[in-house]
Image (cartoon, coloured by chain):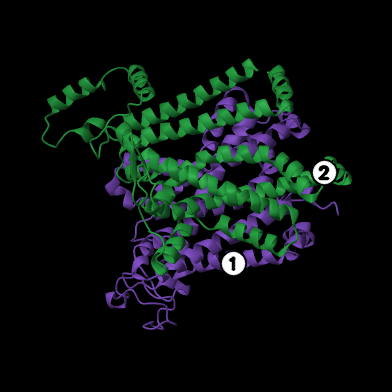
């Protein structure tokens, strides 16, 4: 095994080209290209993200444009079945929205909430972890106790509780418009612990290294030491946790929406689509629930596989 | 030993204290309890009188102490939505959730352990590969989707099993059980599988990993050298040594099974505590939410404590480590 750096993109290099060539040479890219499952997972994730970003261009219809949907088209089966309409490849839902279009727009909402809540969890967790590790003492003990208590409850339960409390504070009627924010907050807050514990651990190690002592000796402000010197050195594992947490966040969002405390039917995420379709399952209109379900499962599986690979690739112990 | 037990007990009490504080804060500051209890025509003076009567004008510490005291005796107040004591509602719904949780934990153990042993012994077998792939897919499929798929196949298409409810229940002195009638048992099958599937994959993977680990050890090689039968080596020696972590994890997972029952109960309209909690969240029924939070926390803390103490009894190495950790501070 070559002694190339484990994190090729962590440091800012002198020039753009050298960073790129270093990346092409790195072990990480090599192990990526050697794992067909990971390549497939990356392609699937990329397709989902691209479709979500360019949803208005990709989707055959705009499910939010009331002028383009027709109630006469409602509950149509997929086009290859009897009574299917070639305009709607995967059929339509109860309001005449094309399933394929609602899935594309739904993934957009699911991914948006997923990414936003992971960013919130990362900021919260890394911040508290740095604080805990660098300051130590009572602050450290307090933060870690809270983390332990929260860790002993399943994420979905914490998210449900926070969701319920925020809805209570804002009162239920208004919460429809704020669904995005409520979901991002409740999922983000329930996922910070993993980040905080890992970052605290590495901060404890970095804090006693010579470069930190040197910075302290020349009188740099502690906040600057933490942000400019320690932070870049503890970010490696954070990337891995963030990828795995993205899958968790997408699943949590879908679960909350399915349980009826997430996105409203007017702006459906994948979970809401499954919830809507669930009501029509008994009358045999399976496509409303099966297709969004497959989309959700594939997305989560792909992100999970990426996270697993990243964890192994960035962990020198496993080579 | 005694010091360890006392330290663990204090820790548990601290956790419960924080959870109670959280539940109290929810109860007291989210929404206005008086506003929820009175009609629109109640005058301001009457509201104030009710406030004083309920003790909402007392100092916060006294209110909190009263809240904890009430909760400790099982009094969680009155549901805003149903206007009934929360403790009574919980007592009615607890049997449904406990039956579902325990049956699904048993299911995941009885199926997961043999599958784990098999995949551990026949690492490269075709069946093992199928099990492992299936478990990966099982982890990626959300619980509610598995439930929906089961309902579609077994209730809608085949019509074999009921899609919702508990079937026929028998009343055993306040404990309404569905385990004594065929309808009740049939209604239990799909919810129990849905709830237990994730634990099943977890247990299977754990047993497999432990088996692979144990099979490499010297005493297994020695047992084989002594000419013992495969059966005696695999089950008498290997499996026995994998069971301690399995039992621990199953114990710890029992708590999350009860929590995940929220989702399963919603999919199958199972009349348990989880469904009640979810409806409470949808209607911002704070007393039920607070009571559920405290109860679940109590379950978790109690299970954690028992598992830790059992570990301490079972594993002598822990005793050494505990004293070392204590010596450091």
Given residues B314 and B325, the one toward you in this image is B314
Q: Which label is found at residue B220?
A: 2
Q: Residue B322's spot in the image, x, y percent?
A: 69, 22
Distance, label 2 to label 1, CA atoms, is 44 Å
Which residue bears the numbered disc 1? A44
Q: Name the residue rendered at 64%, 54% in the picture.
A: A307
**Residue B189 visible from this viewpoint:** yes
Q: What is the chain identity of the residue bearing mark 2?
A: B
Disc 1 residue crowd, few under 14, some 14–19, many 20+, Cα 10 Å: some
Q: Colour of chain B?
A: green
Horizontally, residue A267 falls left or right of residue A124, namely: left
Disc 2 residue crowd, few under 14, some 14–19, many 20+, Cα 10 Å: some
Task: Provide the secondary structure element on which disc 2 rests.
Answer: helix
Given residues B13 and B220, the one toward you in this image is B220
Colour purple maps to chain: A
Please say if A147 is above or below A173: above
Q: Name the residue rendered at 68%, 29% in the picture.
A: B314
Query: Quarter holding the N terminus of chain B?
Result: top right
Please say if B292 is above or below A217: below
């Amino acid at each position: 095994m070559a002694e190339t750096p484990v994190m090729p993109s962590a440091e800012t290099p002198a020039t753009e080209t050298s960073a790129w060539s270093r990346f092409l040479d790195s072990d990480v890219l090599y192990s990526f290209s050697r794992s067909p499952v990971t390549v497939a997972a990356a392609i699937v994730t990329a397709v989902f993200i691209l479709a979500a970003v360019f949803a208005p261009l990709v989707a055959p219809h705009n499910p939010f444009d009331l002028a383009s949907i027709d109630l006469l088209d409602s509950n149509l089966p997929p086009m290859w079945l009897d009574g299917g309409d070639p305009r709607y490849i995967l059929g339509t839902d109860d309001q005449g929205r094309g399933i394929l279009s609602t899935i594309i727009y739904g993934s957009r909402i699911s991914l948006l909430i997923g990414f936003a809540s992971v960013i919130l969890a990362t900021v919260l967790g890394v911040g508290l972890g740095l604080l805990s590790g660098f300051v130590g003492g009572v602050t450290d003990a307090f933060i870690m106790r809270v983390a332990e208590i929260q860790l002993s409850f399943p994420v979905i339960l914490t998210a449900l509780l926070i969701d319920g409390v925020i809805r209570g504070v804002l009162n239920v009627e208004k919460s429809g418009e704020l669904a995005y924010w409520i979901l991002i907050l409740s999922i983000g807050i329930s996922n910070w612990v993993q980040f905080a514990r890992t970052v605290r651990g590495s901060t404890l190690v970095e804090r006693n290294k010579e470069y930190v002592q040197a910075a302290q000796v020349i009188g740099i402000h502690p906040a600057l030491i933490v942000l400019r010197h320690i932070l870049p050195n503890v970010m490696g594992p954070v990337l891995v946790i963030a990828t795995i947490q993205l899958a968790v966040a997408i699943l949590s969002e879908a679960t909350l929406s399915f349980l009826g405390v997430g996105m409203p039917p007017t702006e459906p995420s994948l979970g809401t689509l499954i919830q809507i379709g669930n009501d029509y399952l008994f009358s045999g209109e399976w496509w409303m629930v099966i297709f969004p379900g497959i989309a959700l499962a594939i997305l989560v599986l792909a992100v999970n596989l990426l996270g697993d690979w990243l964890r192994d690739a960035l962990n020198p112990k496993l080579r | 030993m005694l010091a360890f037990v006392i330290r663990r007990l204090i820790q548990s009490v601290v956790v419960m204290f924080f959870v109670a504080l959280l539940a109290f804060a929810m109860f007291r500051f989210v929404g206005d309890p008086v506003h929820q209890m009175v009609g629109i025509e109640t005058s301001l003076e009457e509201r104030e009188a009710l406030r004083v009567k309920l003790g909402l004008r007392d100092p916060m510490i006294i209110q909190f102490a009263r809240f904890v005291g009430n909760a400790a005796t099982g009094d969680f107040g009155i549901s805003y939505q149903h206007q009934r004591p929360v403790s009574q509602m919980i007592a009615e719904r607890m049997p449904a959730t406990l039956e579902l949780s325990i049956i699904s934990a048993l299911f995941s153990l009885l199926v997961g352990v043999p599958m784990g042993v098999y995949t551990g012994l026949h690492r490269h077998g075709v069946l093992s590969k199928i099990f492992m792939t299936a478990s990966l897919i099982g982890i990626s499929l959300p619980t509610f989707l598995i439930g929906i798929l089961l309902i579609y196949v077994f209730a809608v298409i085949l019509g074999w099993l009921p899609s919702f409810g508990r079937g026929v229940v028998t009343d055993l002195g306040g404990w309404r059980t569905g385990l004594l009638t065929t309808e009740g048992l049939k209604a239990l099958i799909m919810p129990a599988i849905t709830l237990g599937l994730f634990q099943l994959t977890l247990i299977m993977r754990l047993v497999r990993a432990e088996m692979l680990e144990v099979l490499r050890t010297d005493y297994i090689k020695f047992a084989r050298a002594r000419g013992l039968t495969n059966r005696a080596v695999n089950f008498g020696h290997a499996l026995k040594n994998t069971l301690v972590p399995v039992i621990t994890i199953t114990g710890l997972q029992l708590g999350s099974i009860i929590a995940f029952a929220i989702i399963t109960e919603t999919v199958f309209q199972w009349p348990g505590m989880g469904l009640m909690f979810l409806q409470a969240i949808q209607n911002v029924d704070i007393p039920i939410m607070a009571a559920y939070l405290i109860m679940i926390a109590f379950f978790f803390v109690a299970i954690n404590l028992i598992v830790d103490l059992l570990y301490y009894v079972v594993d002598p190495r822990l005793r050494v480590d505990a004293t070392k950790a204590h010596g450091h501070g």
